[in-house]
Amino acid sequence: MLDDPGSFKNTDKYHSILDENEEKWTFGFNTQKLRDYLDKFDLTLIEDMGAIEYRKQYMSERQNLLSGYEFYRVAFAELDK
């Protein structure tokens, strides 16, 4: 989303909202590097889902009402023991 905003639906709308509120996104993850990033903090990646997947699993009653912002992801990790 940060490197190629045009690759996702509605990013121009989202950037406009951020600009209106004088906010900027400055941090994001390449999903293929997330596991290595978490390892630095003794965290193990359990699950990493894109917007469509997490909506199906956790918001099934609303999944058809939500569209856009497909650049959001949800990652679950646990602290190594």
Image (cartoon, rainbow, N blue to C red):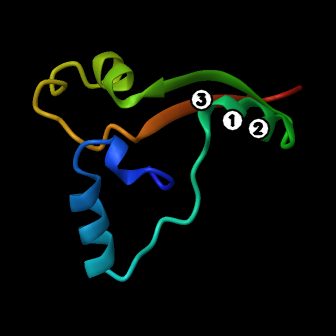
Three-letter amino acid code of the residue under disc 2: Leu
As measured in the structure, the alpha-carbon distance from the residue carrying label 1 to the one carrying label 3 is 11 Å
The residue that appears at 22% across and 50% down in the rendered structure is 10
Front: mark 1 or 2: 1
As measured in the structure, the alpha-carbon distance from the residue carrying label 2 to the one carrying label 3 is 10 Å
The residue that appears at 72% across and 29% down in the rendered structure is 78
Tag of residue 53: none
Mark 2 residue element = helix
Q: Percent position (x, y) of residue 17?
A: 25, 69
Q: Relative to residue 47, is residue 38 depicted above or below? A: below
Q: Percent position (x, y) of residue 67?
A: 18, 36
Q: Is residue 71 left or right of residue 65?
A: right
Where is residue 59, by image quadrant? Answer: top left
Q: Which residue is mark 1?
A: 34
Please state, as top left, top right, bottom left or bottom right, where the C terminus lies in the image: top right
Q: Which residue is mark 3?
A: 76
